Each structure stands twice: as C-alpha cells, then as structure tokens.
C-alpha cells in the first residue's frame, strides 16, 4: 500500500477524495448539515428530505474503477479500511483540531480572548488540550490498519469568530517569562507598551510567533505519537493558502514541512476564478518548494462556491499541475453524488 507519492518520489500520483461514513457504516451521497441547507436554499435547490447513502463496498469499487487511490475519511470502521485496501485505496482518517468534543473539555483548556472572555475552543498552547487532541489519532492507529492520518483545522479559529486569542493566565505567563512583557498590552488600548527596545510591531511579531509555535508543537507531537505506535505511518494536513491569510490563524505549515512533521501536504484550492486560482497555485508551489509531496485540494461543492461540471475541475487539475503542485490532487464536496458523476471524466486526465 506504499505505492503513492506520499511514500516518496517516482511513485503513483495521488488521486484522493474526501468521504464521510455514517453510524450505520454507509457513505452519504449528500451532506445535509446546516451550512449546506442554507447553500441549497440560496442556490434555489430543493431541500434534501431523506439522506441517500450507499454501501462502502459498492463505493470503493466505483472509486477504484475511476483511479481513486486514496480516501480521507470522516468517520471510520473496519469495513471501510478492508474494502478500501481490497481495492488498492489508501485510507487516512481525519483528525479535526477544533474538536467536536468541546463540551467535554477541562475548564482550563478553553481559550480566553483579549476581553477576558472564555471562547468555546480549546487552547493549542495548553499541553493537556494537545494530549486530548492527539489521543484519538493514536487510538485510530492502534485499532485500524490505516495508511496515515490527515489533519483538518490544524490552526487557530479565525479571529472574527473567536476573537484575538489566547490571553489566558497560563499563555500570558509563558510568554512573559520568555520576553519580559505581557502580551495583553498589544491588544488592549491604554495598557503599557512593550519594553522600549521593542516596537509595537516587533512585540506583535513575537506574540504571533508564539501562537504559530503552539500549532507547530501540536503537529510535531502528533507525528511523534503516531509513529511511536506504527513506524513509517504518514501524516498529511489540509492547509490554507499563502501568507498573509495563514498568518491570521497562525498556521505555519511551511515550518511543518521543514521540520519533516508532514509527509505530504494538501493546500486549499477553493478558488473559483481561474486566474486567481492559477496565482494561488503558483504561490502554494513556491511555499512547498519541492520539500515534500503536494496535492492541491479542489472543491466541487464547498461553502466557498462550486464548479458547474467536470470540465471545470479538470482545468483546475491541469493548472495546479503546471504550476508545480505535481504530486496529484484531492477532491472535496458536500455532494458526493454529483462529484461521483464527474469521476469517469477526471479519470482520463493525465498528470
């Protein structure tokens, strides 16, 4: 099963796809979350009354017949792993750093914004919270014969959602011991300024770097933990685009590549203007700089927009390949039923 570019140069290029698995072990063909319901209403589409699902075996055969060789799975069971491997498809379950278990967090794991208010997201700077996020990945590696782990939301939450975080007592103390000033002075007007030898800009740089380092530490610790269970298991991550966007969520994925915490990376290609998409791909390829395999993530139907047909996706695949993201692609959709109808055309694309 180690025949993909994720395993090294000169191997088969990745043709991946995101899938979900419901509680009955079936694969839903259409997402019916609140966000998708709003989108369908906005686009004038009919609501989904009954969730349509297909058996795993049937879908894995279809994927294999269309040259899909990797799935990033939200939800996992033994049958999915078995059927995927039977069809020479690698399996990477998804670990989401925002955590769906926010209600189960220890009170001191929540982040605090600059106003002193708790926000409903865990603090990556807290060792206990990092361990809480790493544990499910380790359990998956122990329980299933998976090929790797894929990270999602490997970052801080956007500031417009959570506010500027984290200013809890522990984060402030840790930073103050390093740099001899309290980071709250950067966020609250009227507070003291950083030490005279530091400008406001330099102080902000250090505070931003501190938060980037928290996520970088989490990624590094997770990689070491899963490799401690299964030597050689791969780690990938869905990441946002080039700076300055990534800086807003403190996602220094270039450093993760440099540290060899990632075996391959799948940066976001959710851009539905071809000129803008081409520029994005060039920027992303420059960041990767051939330091690890890179596969553009293409969204057939996302919260950002959607493509109208297979030809549009094929154009994006070719643009990304030409720009230097040469190790394959990963497809995402909220409508697997529609994307599946595009796969026979995408199968014929040479990359």
Image (spheres, grey):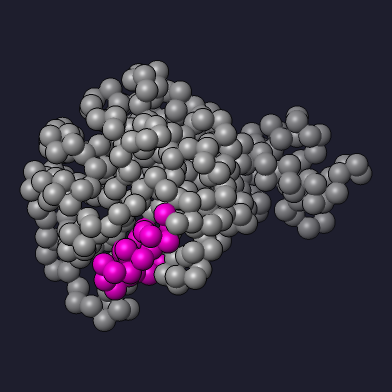
Q: Does the magenta run of residues contain 320?
A: yes
Instruction: Answer with left or right where residue 217 lies relative to residue 30.
Output: right
Q: Position of residue 343 (x, y in %)?
A: 20, 58
Q: Which residue appears at 39% of the width and 45% of the height?
A: 327
Image quadrant occupied by the N terminus: top left
Residue 33 image offset from top left, x and y in percent: 27, 61
Q: Residue at x 30, y 79 (%)?
A: 43
From what the image shows, is residue 93 above or below residue 240? above
In the rendered image, residue 50, in percent from the top left (x then y), is placed at: 11, 64
Residue 75: % across, % down: 24, 42
Q: Nearer the viewer, residue 257 or 168?
A: 257
Residue at 21%, 62% in the rendered image = 345
Taking the magenta stretch, the answer to whether it contains residue 41 is no
**In front of the other: 4 or 303:** 4
Range of residues picked out in magenta: 298-321
169 horizontally vs 61: left or right: right
């Amino acid at each position: 099963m180690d025949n993909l570019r994720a395993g090294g140069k000169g191997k088969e290029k990745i043709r991946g796809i995101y899938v979900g698995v419901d509680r009955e072990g079936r694969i839903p063909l259409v997402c019916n979350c609140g966000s998708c319901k709003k989108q369908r209403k906005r686009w004038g589409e009919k609501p989904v009354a009954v969730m349509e699902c297909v058996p795993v075996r049937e879908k894995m055969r279809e994927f294999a017949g269309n040259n899909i060789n990797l799935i990033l799975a939200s939800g996992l069971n033994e049958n999915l792993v078995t059927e995927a491997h039977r069809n020479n498809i690698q399996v990477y379950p998804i670990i989401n750093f925002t955590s769906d278990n926010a209600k189960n967090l220890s009170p001191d794991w929540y982040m605090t914004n600059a106003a002193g208010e708790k926000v409903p997201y865990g603090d990556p700077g807290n060792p206990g919270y990092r361990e809480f996020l790493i544990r499910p990945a380790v359990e998956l590696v122990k329980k299933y014969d998976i090929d790797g782990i894929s990270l999602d939301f490997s970052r801080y939450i956007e500031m417009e959602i959570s506010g500027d975080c984290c200013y809890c007592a522990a984060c402030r103390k840790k930073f103050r011991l390093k740099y001899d000033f309290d980071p709250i002075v950067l966020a609250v007007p009227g507070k003291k300024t950083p030490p005279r030898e530091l400008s406001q800009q330099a102080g902000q740089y250090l505070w931003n770097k501190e938060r980037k380092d928290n996520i970088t530490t989490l990624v590094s610790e997770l990689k070491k933990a899963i490799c401690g269970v299964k030597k050689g298991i791969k780690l990938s991550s869905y990441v946002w685009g080039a700076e300055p966007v990534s800086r807003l969520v403190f996602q220094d994925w270039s450093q993760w590549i440099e540290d060899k915490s990632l075996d391959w990376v799948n940066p976001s290609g959710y851009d539905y203007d071809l000129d803008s998409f081409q520029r994005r791909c060039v920027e992303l390829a420059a960041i990767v700089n051939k330091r690890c395999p890179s596969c553009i993530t293409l969204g057939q139907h996302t919260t950002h927009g959607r493509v109208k047909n297979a030809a549009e996706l094929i154009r994006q695949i070719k643009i990304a390949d030409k720009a230097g993201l040469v190790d394959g692609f990963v497809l995402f959709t909220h409508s697997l039923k529609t994307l599946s109808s595009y796969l026979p055309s995408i199968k014929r694309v040479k990359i």
